[in-house]
Image: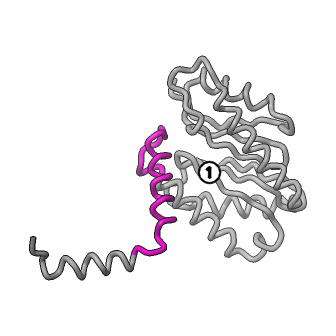
């Protein structure tokens, strides 16, 4: 079998260029798997990722916000959740105004609390709460089409925010499962409903 004169050099060049890209391939595969189970369109899934990147960049570019606040941005179905802490209403509103003008943002839920930025210990606790909630969602029964990966869970200072596109019966089960987790002080549902 005779190889095309360009095939071998192309194959070698591809192998060289792809070295070290296993993480990108695996990450891309994981994202692909998440999109398959998601009720958002692929385009909306990508839009949400872009919104989060743009929002974070804009907030980090503002020195006053960067130096004085702790703000997280989560986008789901082009609806943005701002969570975290800001020391003043002015900074809370400034963050909201910066985010609300990003293209494709349909709505902003500004849940920033007026307080000093949370400690590393509090943020670690929130990460642990989020992990426990996500794990507990796999125990949800009596919902035939329910997939726990369809729920976005964000924890901030003991408050758990739940986002997703769900049936009302699924949402009720998710809320009940979330409330049973130790450390959860409040549950805020930001769902969009299919029914």
3 drawn magenta: no
Residue depicted at 82% across the width and 36% down the height: 186
Q: Secondary structure at mark 1?
A: strand
User: Which is nearer the eye, 76 or 129?
Assistant: 129
Residue most extreme to the top = 142
Q: Is residue 161 left or right of residue 8?
A: right
> Residue pushed farthest front?
1
Q: Residue at x 75, y 39 (%)?
A: 132
Q: Quadrant of the N terminus?
A: bottom left
Q: Nearer the viewer, residue 182 or 58?
A: 182
Report x, y in % for residue 163: 63, 40
Horizontal relation, residue 38 to residue 117: left or right: left
Task: Give the labeled residue for mark 1.
Answer: 80
- Quarter of the figure with residue 178: top right
State the extent of the magenta-drawn residues as a range.
18-45
Which percent across, then down, holds residue 173? 67, 23
Residue at the (57%, 61%) spot, across then down: 101
Which secondary structure dominates the residues rendered in magenta? Answer: helix
Residue 153 at x, y = what percent?
Answer: 68, 43
- Report the side of 148 relative to 189 (left or right): left
Residue 88 against residue 192 in the figure, above or below: below
The chosen color scheme is one colour
Residue 3, relative to residue 31: is it above or below? below
Q: Is 105 drawn above or below residue 64 in the view shown?
A: above
Q: Nearer the viewer, residue 27 or 38?
A: 27
């Amino acid at each position: 079998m005779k190889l095309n004169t360009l095939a071998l050099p192309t194959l070698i060049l591809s192998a060289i260029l792809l070295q070290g890209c296993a993480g990108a391939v695996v990450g891309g595969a994981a994202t692909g798997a998440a999109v398959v189970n998601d009720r958002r369109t692929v385009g909306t899934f990508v839009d949400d990722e872009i919104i989060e990147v743009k929002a974070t960049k804009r907030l980090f570019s503002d020195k006053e916000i960067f130096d004085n606040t702790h703000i997280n941005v989560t986008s789901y179905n082009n609806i943005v959740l701002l969570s975290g802490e800001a020391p003043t209403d002015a900074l809370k509103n400034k963050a909201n105004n910066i985010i609300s003008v990003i293209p494709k943002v349909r709505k902003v839920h500004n849940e920033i609390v007026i307080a000093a930025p949370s400690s590393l210990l509090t943020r670690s606790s929130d990460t642990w709460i989020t992990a426990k909630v996500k794990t507990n969602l796999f125990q949800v029964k009596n919902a035939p089409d329910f997939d726990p990966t369809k729920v976005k869970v964000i924890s901030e200072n003991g408050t758990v925010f739940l986002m997703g596109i769900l049936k009302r019966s699924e949402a009720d089960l998710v809320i009940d499962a979330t409330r049973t987790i130790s450390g959860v002080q409040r549950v805020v549902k930001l769902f969009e409903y299919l029914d």
